[in-house]
Image (cartoon, rainbow, N blue to C red):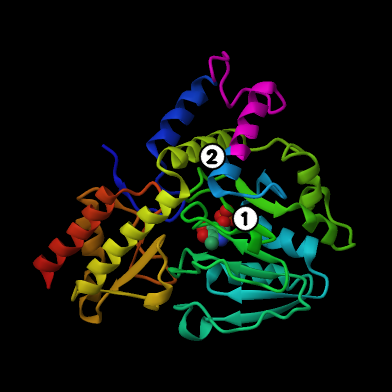
Amino acid sequence: MRKHIFNAGPCKLSDRTLENTARAVLELDDNGQSVMEVSHRSPEFEAVIDETKALMHEVMNIPDDFEILFLGGGASMQFAMIPYNFLQGKAFYLDTGTWSTKAIKEAALWGDVIEVSSEDKGFTYIPKGYDIPADADYAHITTNNTIKGTEIMEDMDSPVPLMADMSSDFMSRPVDFSKYAMVYGGAQKNVGPAGATFVIIRKSMLDKVVDRPIPTMLKYKTHVDKDSMFNTPPCVNIFAIRETCKWVKEMGGVEAMDKLAQHRADTLYNAIDESNMFKGTVAKEDRSRMNICFVFEDKYEGLQKDFLSFSSDRNIIGIKGHRSVGGFRASTYNACTMDDVNALVKAMKDFEKENA
Ligand code: PLP
């Protein structure tokens, strides 16, 4: 029996992704070899990666002047690659929590960081009404803050190239790529299993690369020129991403994902707001649809472990909050169903009835 999986990433994937990837691990398209065994330079695998990119272009409506790369190193490697390639003078960073703080640390190695932060209130809101300096090399935002549970839903205007870490909300809503120079993320939320990083970069950004020695593997140009095949790409992961893109398309595209994300989040936040036992942790207008963070009202704090085991007895897993926030976090990525959400809401209500 499938559990109700609310893990923050790696996380629940669609049945289609799991079943077809499992099949391809045994044999890829009647080829007599596994997707783990096939050469990444073979026509069979080329067809897989080409179709994956084409599907991602289609599903996310990515214009042709962007290149899609599948790299290793996680989103964390991008924290370093972005400034290594593009930061000469100063860059603007919006600091909205743990992951953007890590990105800033890397950027500071290469230039000045102009920062606007919500740290003053424990990253419980998204800063607003700030100016991005027009002489910055680029601006960097984290659209969904997986740990703190806030999200930027708007594709904002920026006077300088805008780079977005979309690790935890990519493919959950349509994105207006005209606003971005680069969008990237670890695949392990809405896109596929852990091990591949998607980088969607505007080709003209290659003209803006800083004139400094950059190791070959850390240059975007290397990977663009070689079509993500400079070194051996994460083949199985790319196959799984293809299946996820097919699933999203079958489900009605990213517009359908958007509606489902809203429905899941509304249902859970309503349950939190109606409860006298649980409360949310962030400003309501900035609440994430992907990572729903909540805690006990003070007088129930001692019941934390009890609620986790109460939920676990109902096959609900992955709801323990990140250690830096505490409480609970339900990650409701694309493959999370209303059945999963309703099971959690029922557990919250039943627990409250029994313990309040
Ligand atoms: N950025 C965000 C928003 C994340 O949620 C994560 C991981 O959860 C990362 C970056 C780091 O990704 P990776 O583990 O692929 O380096």
Outermost left residue: 354
Q: Quadrant of the C terminus?
A: bottom left
Tell which of 82 and 129 is nearer to you.
129
Is 42 included in the stretch rendered in magenta? yes
Under circle 2, the secondary element is helix
Residue in the picture at 52% in, 36% down: 240
Residue 102 in the figure: left or right of residue 214: left
- Establish whether ligand 1 lies closer than 8 Å to the Cβ of label 1: no
As measured in the structure, the alpha-carbon distance from the residue carrying label 2 to the one carrying label 1 is: 14 Å
Is 46 included in the stretch rendered in magenta? yes
Residue holding disc 2: 241
Q: Quadrant of the N terminus?
A: top left
Outermost bottom residue: 120
Residue in the picture at 46% in, 24% down: 23
Q: Quadrant of ligand 1?
A: bottom right
Residue in the picture at 53% in, 72% down: 97
Residue holding disc 1: 184
x then y, percent, for residue 334: 41, 50
The span picked out in magenta is 29-54
x then y, percent, for residue 273: 25, 73
